[in-house]
């Protein structure tokens, strides 16, 4: 083999590994894989369940999964920084209870504002303790999960409070152009979250905190402020979700949001966000949440025992994670 031929092979190899298609696949494999899983499941349920692929059912799936999408978008930021927020389910329970009780006093607008403020304050406490108190976010938000659920039970005595205000009910049950309002709010949240995460300096800082916080700190960025901010965002949007849930159910209950945090975290991880931080995808999270929604809906339409829904979701999460990790490792080895 001539020297000229020998030199050509490594050039071709570099050209293959550095091609735009290869780089695109390597960079976006996580979201590509979850989109593939979503399409396969969508096709399966469309074939097996006659009522699945109908406009009425799909619109209903969108409404049911909207609260998960809204909180999961902000949870993506939290997990990308290397933290986690286990308190969002309890914040939903406390916020929906507070909303119903404040509406009962005769001022629904103040109730709405107060509800979101309560959620944001809970996030502020989490953020201060985790970022400035130097406590692990896991421990801080686990304590909040327990304490806030207790507060919700205390102020309601375990009873649900009905909501009869029309415009609050519209937020959970109303439609715009044939699509439920909660799903429109979810889409706006996804668009805003994507822009914040990918197109702003704050979003770049979020990724840097999770991947190399020490280098970011030495560059003069206040990483504690970033860590606190994302926890405030996740809690605040949990409060917004609680309003939509309360409006849909026409009541505020201390039991709202039970295990909600696990569904949110599953959607985020399923969408390709690294639980250790440093890598996240808002669009992946969106597709991950939709995947969980169609799994729950499709299994119900197939008349599968409801207890199989979380089992199936967990198995799909594990399989998706294994496939993603193996594919990422393969891409890395080939690139090296």
Image (spheres, helix red, strand yellow):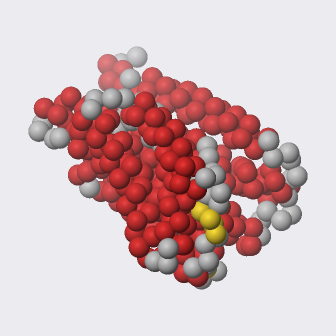
Residue 249 lies, in percent from the top left, at: 66, 66
Residue 313 lies, in percent from the top left, at: 69, 41
Q: In this rendering, is residue 211 above or below 71?
A: above
Q: In this rendering, is residue 290 above or below 28?
A: below
The foreground one among 260 and 121 is 121
Residue 212 lies, in percent from the top left, at: 26, 31
Q: In this rendering, does residue 143 appear at all?
A: yes
What residue is rendered at 23% in x and 52% in y?
A: 201
The foreground one among 31 and 226 is 226
Tell me which corner region of the image, top left, top right, bottom left or bottom right, holds residue 114: bottom left
* Quarter that holds the N terminus: top left
What residue is rendered at 58% in x and 56% in y?
A: 156
Tell me which corner region of the image, top left, top right, bottom left or bottom right, holds residue 179: bottom right
Q: Is residue 249 left or right of residue 19?
A: right
Residue 157 lies, in percent from the top left, at: 61, 53
Q: In this rendering, does residue 284 appear at all?
A: no
- Residue furthest to the top in view is 1
Q: In this rendering, is residue 328 above or below 188?
A: above
């Amino acid at each position: 083999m001539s020297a000229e031929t020998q030199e050509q092979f490594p050039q071709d190899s570099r050209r293959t590994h550095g091609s735009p298609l290869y780089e695109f696949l390597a960079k976006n494999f996580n979201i590509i894989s979850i989109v593939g899983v979503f399409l396969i499941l969508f096709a399966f349920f469309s074939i097996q369940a006659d009522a699945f692929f109908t406009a009425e059912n799909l619109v209903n799936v969108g409404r049911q999964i909207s609260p998960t999408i809204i909180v999961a978008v902000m949870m993506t930021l939290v997990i990308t920084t290397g933290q986690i927020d286990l308190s969002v389910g309890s914040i939903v329970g406390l916020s929906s209870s507070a909303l119903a009780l404040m509406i009962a006093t005769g001022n629904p607008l103040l109730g709405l504002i107060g509800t979101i403020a309560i959620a944001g304050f809970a996030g502020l406490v989490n953020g201060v303790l985790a970022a400035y108190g130097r406590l692990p976010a896991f421990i801080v938000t686990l304590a909040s999960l327990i304490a806030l659920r207790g507060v919700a039970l205390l102020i309601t005595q375990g009873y649900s409070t009905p909501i009869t205000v029309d415009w609050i009910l519209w937020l959970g049950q109303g439609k715009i152009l044939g699509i439920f309002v909660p799903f429109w709010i979810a889409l706006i949240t996804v668009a805003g979250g994507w822009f914040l995460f990918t197109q702003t300096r704050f979003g770049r800082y979020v990724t840097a905190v999770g991947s190399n916080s020490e280098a970011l700190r030495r560059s003069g960025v206040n990483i504690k402020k970033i860590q606190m901010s994302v926890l405030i965002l996740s809690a605040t949007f949990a409060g917004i979700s609680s309003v939509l849930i309360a409006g849909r159910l026409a009541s505020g209950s201390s039991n709202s949001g039970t295990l909600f945090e696990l569904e949110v975290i599953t959607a985020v991880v399923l969408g390709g966000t690294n639980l250790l931080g440093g890598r996240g995808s808002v669009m992946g999270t969106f597709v991950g949440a939709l995947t969980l929604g169609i799994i729950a809906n499709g299994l119900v339409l197939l008349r599968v025992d409801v207890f199989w829904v979380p089992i199936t979701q967990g198995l799909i999460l594990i399989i998706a994670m294994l496939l993603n990790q193996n594919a990422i490792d393969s891409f890395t080895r080939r690139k090296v």
